[in-house]
Amino acid sequence: MSEGGGAATSTTDALSREAIARVDASGQLNDVLSLPEHLRDALWRVESAIMAEWDTPAGLVVAGMGGSAIGGALARAALGDHASRPIFVTRAYGLPPWTTPDTTVLCASYSGNTEETLACYESAGALGAQRVVVTTGGRLAEMAREDGVPVIPLPGGFQPRAAVAYMTVAALEVAALCGAGPRLTSEIDVAASHTEQLVAEWGPDAPEDSLAKQTARGLLGTAPVIAGAGLTVPIAYRWKTQINENSKQPAFAHELPELDHNELEGWEGALDVGRFSAVFLDDSDAHPRVKERMDLTEKLIAGNASASFRLETRGQTTIERVISLVLLGDLVSIYLATLRGVDPGPVKLIQQLKADLATG
């Protein structure tokens, strides 16, 4: 028996809804499969919360931690060259030192009680920066309403990491409202329809040789090392954190071309210290030299990797492409948890740390 009380599943067993349900007590799979619906609902929630635009020439800072911060990073990647002002994600107790009253600060905390994000909210207020909050409630919502700060309300009942679509859309929409990027409402709606097709292709009702299921089986028993480049850098980090939280195991992320200047050499000794797998997240619109680097890097580490995968974004727009690999990674992490026989829902060590911090 494995952690969480579920029996480990053989790599040859079907990754069906029934098999997943035996370990997924809190229904994390359903939250992943609802990604298209979340994208559409997020648009409505932002529009209902904020009616006017404003202008902050210094750009946008997204303050958050964990699953609440990743939306800002994914939004920045999706905007790409269309971002007209700086967009920065801070995962800390404070704001970047260059933050000014001409900066918009989006404070993202699913629970509304994340202490680092609360500190950023107060810092932004002291600076006189324009603030926006996205949360389900908690102390963050209380302070925002007292201060007359717009609150984008999120639905409750999720693990924070399952609110990725809401956090991404909130960051994209706030970027547009403050003048840091174009409005992508239509693209988000089209991406939701595209994601529905991918849910059918990769979800639990898909064949056992589907990309998501085969990838999970290939990663089983290894420590995945996920590499991104450009658009896929924050997606690689999302894969890492989803495997950490859902699959309850180590995973690591890096980016090209930087990893070719350091991490590449480490693969020479990989077999001496453990079983590592490599996942390269490619973008269909990546720079040709980046694609060439991925090819060569994969060949150079092939003999020392327990498994290697080259996965490419799907879709036409940047939003479609970003969400495609987010969905794939989320499904892989749930399937991997099922194969390991662990419940993807609880995050016992994170909760223990919070409790220990609360008691000093």
Image (cartoon, rainbow, N blue to C red):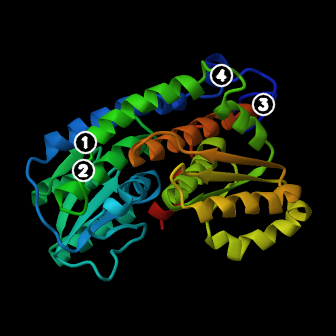
The residue beneath circle 1 is: 185
Where disc 1 sits, the SS reads: helix
Among the two numbered marks 2 and 1 on one chain, the one whose residue lies closer to the N terminus: 2
C-alpha span from label 3 to label 2? 42 Å
Among the two numbered marks 4 and 3 on one chain, the one whose residue lies closer to the N terminus: 3
The residue beneath circle 4 is: 22
Q: Quadrant of the N terminus?
A: top right
Q: In this rendering, which labeled residue sits more in front, label 4 or label 1? A: 1
Mark 3 is surrounded, within 10 Å at the Cα level, by few (under 14), some (14 to 19) or many (20 or more) other residues, namely some
Query: Residue 79 at what x, y percent from top left?
Result: 35, 56
Mark 2 is surrounded, within 10 Å at the Cα level, by few (under 14), some (14 to 19) or many (20 or more) other residues, namely many
The residue beneath circle 2 is: 173
**Mark 4: which amino acid?**
Arg
C-alpha span from label 2 to label 1? 8 Å
C-alpha span from label 4 to label 1? 38 Å
Q: In this rendering, does residue 352 appear at all?
A: no
**Mark 3: which amino acid?**
Ala
**What residue is shown at x 26% (from left), y 39% (from top)?**
186
The residue beneath circle 3 is: 8
Q: Quadrant of residue 108?
A: bottom left
Outermost residue to the front? 288
Q: In this rendering, does residue 72 appear at all?
A: yes
